[in-house]
Image: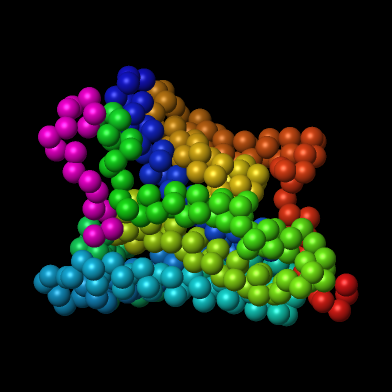
Amino acid sequence: MTVKLFFDFLYRAIIQGIPLLYGCSGEILTERSGHLNLGIPGIMYVGAMSGVIGAYFYEHGRTQINPTTALLLTLGCSILGSLLMGLIYCFLTITLRANQNVTGLALTTFGVGFGNFFGGSLIRLAKTEGASVQVSETSKVFKKTLSLEGTPVWFRDYVGKILFTYSFFAYLAIIIALILAYVLRKTRVGLHLRAVGENPATADAAGINVNRYKYVATSIGSVIAGLGGLYYIMDYADGVWSNNGFGDRGWLAIALVIFSVWRPAIAIAGSFFFGGLYIIHNYLPGMTMGSQELIKMTPYVVTVLILILISTFRKKETQPPAHLGLSYFREER
């Protein structure tokens, strides 16, 4: 692999990793409150589809769009759709204390169905050729990057390409992860949230409103995950929606939570690592179809190995929240 090809691989690995980072950051925040949300893949679908719906109806019939309006409308629709999914999960698992695993899987099924149903509806409305619908003008707003024209070739093709050629949405994922890392480790709110995830009965006895923390953390986590779906469509896929086009990225985001040992800062590097593993088969010469499929399993194999190491050494700082996946009923204290 030449140097230029290696830098191209790093660049594409980072782009592939950004949706995973959004999903992972949102799930880490949720799991820190003691809730295991397996609905992240479905929430990413809904976040993406809600944004596409808003962008499509804003673009439809217009020869020119207002970039600010297109950006805010698309973001607003995506946030609203993801938030509603998060609130549904909260109501079922926190208020009604339904099984978290079953609820999460149901949300994933619903989210994928929601995306495919409305995606098919938009395809018929747009009367496009093929099984896809495109919101290219809005996508151009999301994909705007810094210009490296006038810089030396070595900088533009190597260092500059790796550091400065992404959209604002990619940098936002990193900023959100760093903010979460700071809040969880350095603030009173983060301390309370971690206490809720470790032992909600003790946190409740100390005067912490357990249900409020769970609702807020899960809802915000769902919104963050939904933005990962929107990034995939608007940036990576150039505004093109096709049913079932996400692949297994939502599940990879959940696997990345384990890989990052529930730390958002580690998730940044982990997402780029997983992004590289996701596409590395395209850069290895002489790969057969069977070999490519085996290579695609690598992120999951790595996650299993990390899980084995965590379970073997049992270091407190690498363990999941003690109350993860368990419902809390105040009268049972």
* Residue 98 appears in the picture as rendered: no
Q: Position of residue 204 (x, y in %)?
A: 78, 71
The secondary structure that most of the magenta stretch takes on is loop
The magenta span reads 141-156
Quadrant in the picture for residue 54: bottom left
For residue 103: magenta?
Answer: no
Q: Nearer the viewer, residue 126 or 180?
A: 180
Residue 321, placed above or below residue 162: below
Picture residue at 12% right of the left edge, 34% below the top: 150
Picture residue at 80% right of the left edge, 62% below the top: 199
Q: Position of residue 218 (x, y in %)?
A: 60, 67
Residue farthest toward the top in the current orientation of the protein: 2
Quarter holding the N terminus is top left
Quadrant in the picture for residue 128: bottom left
Q: Position of residue 122 (x, y in %)?
A: 32, 73
* Residue 286 appears in the picture as rendered: yes
Q: Position of residue 45 (x, y in %)?
A: 46, 64
Q: Nearer the viewer, residue 291 or 111?
A: 111
Q: Nearer the viewer, residue 219 or 60?
A: 219
Would you say 181 lies left or right of 276 here?
right
Q: Nearer the viewer, residue 244 or 32?
A: 32
> How many marks do you count on the picture?
0
Picture residue at 28% right of the left edge, 67% below the top: 71
